[in-house]
Amino acid sequence: MRQVREIIRLKFSGGIPTREIARRLGVAASTVRETLRRFEVGGLGWPLPNGMSDGDLEAALYANHGTKRGHRRHVEPDWPTVHRELKRKHVTLVIVWDEYIAANPGGYSYSRFCELYRGFESKLSPTMRQTHAAGERLFVDYAGDGVPVVIDRLTGEIRNAQVFVAVLGASSFTFAHASWTQALPDWIDAHVHAFAAIGGVPHLLVPDNTKTAVIKACLYDPQVNRTYAEMAAHYDTAILPARPRRPRDKAKVEQAVLIVERWLLGRLRHRTFYSLAEVNAATGELMTARPPFGELVRFARKGLQRRAIDLFEQLPAATTTRSSIQRVPRLFEALALARGDGRHPRLLRNLGRADLLILDDWGLEPLDAAARHDLLEILEERYGRRSTMITSQLPVDRWHEIIGDPTYADAILDRLVHNAHRIELAGESMRRTRGKQNQKA
């Protein structure tokens, strides 16, 4: 404080310039200017009042020392709410800050607000947002707790049945099946039951790293059990195990296991079962009932389930012919969409495998280049191997101009027309005939 008094004395008593005061006292010129500025802001005058001690002078000059911009005393923003609001569409930090200032006029400046929010955000655990397409992934796991089953009525011996849980990613359609063990035969059998319940096969199976499914866990190249891999190849699907020690990769099935344990096991705790068939029957009854917490899991209704299953490869019946009926305009639209999301080769392969492929409404509109190429690929795959039926109201002699490109038209018609049975129908359409009958009735 001695130098402070000397700076004030030299300035107001001697009228010495700032740089000369700094040179004489051996301090920076900025320090002299800051001291004089605080002297003026503090409302002090020269000469100083008699009896003013160094403590009083320091209190007058440095009363607000340490109160920097952004450290004012006011209500701290609710950072979790701010973070949640920023996840909404079209919401930015500027908008949130404007609302904050409107509620707290003396609040943080925008730059300090952003700095504090970035500090809060850096402490959060990063989580990848997963987007599930219909029919793409089936997450599978076993519930941690089993269902007690009495296997000997005389002695009362009890054995725990293991509950297999499978859930679709997009619709959250959940399936549960009880088996005695988690061994490989029961694991494969549970998958077969799940496919039958869903009515189709997803593109990917996502298990955890249980030894039944994955022999050697690896972040980049896990070694899948050979029998499990052969089952996937049989159903024309693929296995994508979750990463080791990354439960969020299969958060869907983790949540489904929790729901199954509460919705099924909790409600079955007072019942006594004497066989696996009884357990699975009771499980089926509860699975079709309305869940009490629809916001946590959505058991698929018919419409939702149908939309998901539309993208599955339909399970072939063991004793029937596999057939596929496709409306030509919709077929080419589906192929165009599949070309964009990577499903195009799989869809062409499925069309080539059907024992009977029926192409309906052929010739309603000319084919573009992509449609011509896809049609030739389908017919080339099926030619001489499987049957193809085409229904059209367009005469065969006009098919050439509908296809468009002469080279493609010759190749396509060569595979269609020359080795085909042609059935021509005459008379009124059945729709018109039935309409007249209904009017008379």
Image (cartoon, helix red, strand yellow):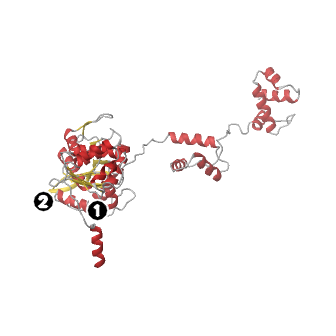
* 377 with respect to 65 (left or right): left
Q: Estimate the x, y position of residue 158 in percent, counting from the top left.
A: 17, 54
Image point (75%, 28%), residue name: 31
Q: Is 180 or 399 nearer to us in this picture? A: 399
Residue that extends furthest to the left in the rendered view of this protein: 154
Q: Nearer the viewer, residue 179 or 41?
A: 179
Q: Is residue 228 left or right of residue 115?
A: left
Image position, residue 337 (x, y; %): 37, 48
Residue sticking out furthest to the right? 14
Is 5 situated left or right of 395 in this image? right
The residue beneath circle 1 is 288
Furthest residue in direction bottom, as rendered: 441
Q: Nearer the viewer, mark 1 or mark 2?
A: 1
Instruction: Evaluate if marks 1 and 2 touch, with contact meaning CB atoms under 8 Å apart.
Output: no
- Say which label, 1 or 2, has the lower sequence index: 2
- Mark 2 Cα within 10 Å, few/some/many (few <14, many 20+)? few
The CA span between labels 1 and 2 is 30 Å
> Which kind of residue does numbered mark 1 sit on?
Thr
Residue tagged by mark 2?
153
